[in-house]
Image (cartoon, rainbow, N blue to C red):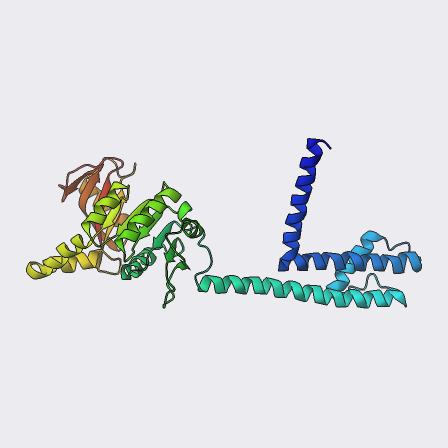
Amino acid sequence: MSIVVVHRLIRVVKGLKKVRRVLYTKLGFVATFFTTMWVVNALLFYYSEHVIAGREEVDLWTSLYWSIITMATIGYGDITPLKGLGWVVAGFAAVMGILAYTLTVSVIADAFLSASIRKTLGMAPLKSKDVVVIGDSDSCMEVIDELVLNGFEDKTGWLTPKQLRIEPRVDYMVGDPSDEGVLKKAGVDRAKHVILCLSDDSKALHIALLVKKVNKKASISAIVSNTKTEDLLREIGVKHTLSNKLLGRAIASAVFEPSVLLFISDVTSVRGKGDLIEVVVDDKLAGRDIESIEEYLDKDSQGYRHRVLAIVRGKEMDIAPSRDYKVVSGDRLVVLRTKAS
């Protein structure tokens, strides 16, 4: 036996195994049952009407048409069986048709119900998510709420290691984030942004390394407890980190400048009276000065006022730039947006 023949036999065996796996599934079984009954009823009708009754107009194609119509219990009446065996075949086809269609509907409904339950319990994979939040700390819910308020509800997924008590406003999945397979199932390998908000800093560091392994292009941000972890995360390429150090600075303002803390609390959320946003300078804005840019933004989004607080060019930041400062393409503007009223 030649090597080519052996390879062909191996492919045939593998193909049969795949067919068997499909047939073992519910939908595969129903599809096979439906097709079998359709063909069997058509052959029985052809035998009873063409062979026994001698009806020349009833060929195989006509029998297949009659079979599918009868199984669907439509019965147009354009083709009817003669007495005797034809009636028995018609009755059998109708019963098998009702059974086949009932099975099909029940299997499809069961599949949708199972998918819905799996999604509700956080067992379904996360698909097509630009942002994946990973963690179980209280700050995760704040992250989710802010993303939703900014219009990222459909683009955000949440991977949490424990079952949630309250249904979140985004799709979520329960699993161990330290498992590479779970990260891929959560869509981390395709996400643009990954936000870590774990209660354990050591886990945050470990998971950040795994995320880097799974998706080297993802932009990773992390909330941590101490500055040492913050420094280590930056060493491995985590772009944005937030530690208790910053929170300590902010809360200290309550002692000697409480208005500053009130301002920070307000502008860091879209729910406040003001909102800090980032505007990337494109060709339309390049070459303009700060005053002209603010007028353009006010006109472009009616009902809001805009004030440029800082300009980021590369790694340098210019805070409170002069009104005649001219920007170039690629500059990032930190803008305070408030309602005009």
Toward the front, the furthest residue is 1
Can residue 339 be seen from the camera position used here?
no
Q: Tell whether 28 sits left or right of 316.
A: right
- Residue at 31% over, 51% down: 195
**Residue at image location 71% in from the left, 59% down from the top:** 33
Q: Position of residue 298 (x, y in %)?
A: 24, 49
Q: Is residue 286 visible?
A: yes
Q: What residue do we see at 18% from left, 44% from top?
A: 310
Image quadrant containing the C terminus? bottom left
Using the rendered view, name the quadrant where residue 313 is placed: top left
Position of residue 116 in the picture relative to residue 334 (left or right): right
Q: Position of residue 234 (x, y in %)?
A: 24, 43
The x and y percentages for residue 222 are 27, 50
How many numbered marks appear? 0
Up-down relation of residue 330 to residue 21 (above or below): above
Between 336 and 214, the one lying in front of the other is 214
Q: Residue furthest left?
A: 256
Specify the quadrant that holds the N terminus: top right
- Residue 271: horizontal and vertical position, in percent? 26, 61
Looking at the picture, tell me which residue is in the foreground, 259 or 122.
Answer: 122
Would you identify the image quadrant in which residue 198 lies? bottom left
Residue in the image at 70% along x and 39% along y: 9
